[in-house]
């Protein structure tokens, strides 16, 4: 029954004019490797195994051991963030783990955090997230034998210790623009937080933030035993569980809102983990069943965890836990095979959000050759009314400045961007800084 529903879903997408690619599943070589990070365009995958860190170039299937102890994230140029042993940094004449970058065949570190000295040969600092340009990382440092602190580092400001509750914290993920970090802060339990730059609680019921999109407007993770998706417009939402599941964790998100992760089934630990893909409007789907419905090749017998997804949604990394085997799932590179129906009335995107430079990108489906873009403040006052004509029916894209009718820049605040066509209107809330 589930496979029939998935097949029906695929046929509905094709009826909407969205081509469905035949995905291919590639096995990442190496012993005991777990894929932890995928670059924004899916060019590279990184992770850790029995031989330390690895870097896998998807095009051509080029695999290399990169040493170090752990490798967590990678950008599109193959620059990795993780931790390694550096003989220049020792405690009692023994190198200790220190956060750093792997780039062009070499590991290097920004060094010790100001005011925090190593207290052990086995632990110090760990890098987890990297910005798209490779100039910013986030991570965690051991302040003493029982407490950790979250940090960011960039080439301009050096290290910044992130605000917490005077207890342990861990910055686990970083937005592509390097401005927003996410992870957890210890309260009476681990609590999902993000930093921008101050710490902001996502949910009081316990959990962790695990992935962020480019501009920090979408964050996913786990809270209250459920996978969550937070966005700057709609706020916090728990993803509906897969039937029969007892809990779930979201570990990756694309810019279009596709979420991946795993759900758990069973009564007693260890619970069984199964990889999922969440498509807006379609709910949480078993990733393996979804691939089979698309006639994917080389689908393994099980997929335990979907660990990440490229920003365009065309590559997913996943792994099995027993034995440890990692995979790259590749959709056709010329199409977005897991998108919303092309003529959905809800296909109206405004990015980035929040807005820092006064410019927004609009992408939408349009049934007409003309449309109307309106901008209003929260009182309903119309600030801008812009007719757009000579459109081609289908996909519509434009970039516009957030200005009033007299060409003046808008003051920081919250605005409503409205698109009107013959089919009706759709509104998106935008935060302008």
Image (tube, helix red, strand yellow):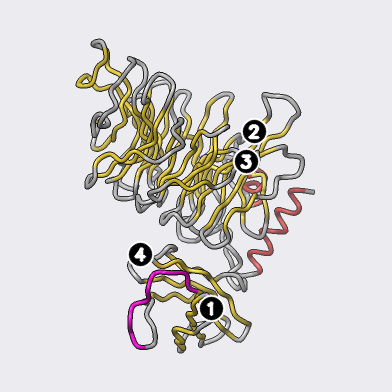
* Of labels 3 and 4, the one closer to you: 3
Q: Which mark is residue 356?
A: 4
Disc 2 to disc 4, C-alpha distance: 40 Å
Which stretch did the figure color magenta? 406-415
The residue sitting at 37% across, 36% down in the picture is 139
Q: Is residue 413 magenta?
A: yes
* Of labels 2 and 1, the one closer to you: 1
* Of labels 2 and 4, the one closer to you: 4
Q: Which mark is residue 379?
A: 1
Q: Callout 2 environment at 10 Å: few (<14), some (14 to 19), or many (20+)? A: many
Position in image of residue 49 (x %, y %): 43, 25
Q: Which mark is residue 273?
A: 2
- Figure quadrant of residue 81: top left
Disc 3 to disc 1, C-alpha distance: 34 Å
* Of labels 3 and 1, the one closer to you: 1
The secondary structure that dominates the magenta segment is loop
* Of labels 1 and 4, the one closer to you: 1
């Amino acid at each position: 029954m589930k496979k029939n529903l998935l097949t029906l879903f695929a046929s509905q997408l094709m009826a909407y004019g969205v081509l469905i690619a035949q995905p291919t599943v590639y096995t990442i070589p190496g012993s005991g490797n777990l894929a932890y990070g995928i670059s924004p365009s899916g060019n590279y995958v990184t992770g850790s195994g029995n031989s330390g860190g690895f870097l896998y170039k998807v095009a051509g299937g080029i695999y290399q051991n990169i040493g170090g102890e752990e490798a967590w994230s990678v950008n599109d140029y193959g620059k990795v963030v993780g931790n390694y042993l550096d003989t220049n940094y020792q405690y009692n004449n023994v190198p200790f783990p220190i956060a750093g970058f792997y780039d062009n065949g070499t590991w290097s570190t920004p060094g010790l955090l100001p005011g925090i000295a190593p207290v052990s040969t086995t632990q110090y600092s760990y890098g987890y997230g990297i910005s798209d340009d490779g100039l910013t990382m986030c991570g965690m440092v051991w302040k003493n034998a029982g407490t950790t602190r979250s940090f960011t580092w960039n080439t301009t400001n050096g290290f910044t210790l992130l605000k917490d509750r005077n207890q342990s914290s861990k910055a686990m993920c970083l937005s592509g623009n390097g401005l927003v970090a996410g992870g957890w802060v210890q309260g009476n339990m681990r609590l999902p937080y993000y930093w921008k730059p101050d710490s902001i609680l996502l949910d009081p019921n316990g959990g962790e933030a695990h992935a962020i999109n480019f501009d920090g407007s979408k964050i996913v993770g786990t809270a209250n035993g459920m996978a969550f998706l937070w966005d700057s417009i709609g706020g916090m939402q728990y993803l509906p569980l897969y039937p029969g599941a007892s809990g779930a964790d979201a570990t990756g998100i694309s810019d279009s809102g596709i979420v991946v992760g795993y759900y758990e089934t069973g009564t007693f630990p260890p619970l069984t983990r199964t990889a999922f893909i969440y498509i807006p409007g379609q709910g949480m789907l078993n990733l393996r069943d979804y691939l089979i419905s698309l006639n994917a090749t080389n689908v393994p017998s099980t997929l335990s965890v979907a660990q990440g997804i490229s920003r365009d949604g065309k590559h997913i990394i996943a792994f099995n836990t027993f034995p440890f085997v990692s995979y790259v799932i590749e959709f056709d590179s010329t199409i977005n095979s897991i998108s919303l129906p092309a003529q959905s009335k809800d296909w109206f995107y405004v990015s980035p959000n929040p807005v820092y430079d006064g410019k927004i990108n609009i992408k939408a489906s349009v049934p007409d050759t003309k449309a109307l873009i309106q901008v209003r403040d929260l009182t309903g006052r119309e600030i801008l009314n812009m007719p757009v004509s000579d459109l081609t029916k289908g996909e519509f894209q434009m970039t516009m400045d957030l200005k009033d009718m007299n060409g003046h820049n808008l003051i920081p605040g919250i605005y409503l961007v409205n698109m009107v066509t013959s089919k009706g209107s759709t509104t998106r809330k935008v935060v302008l800084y």
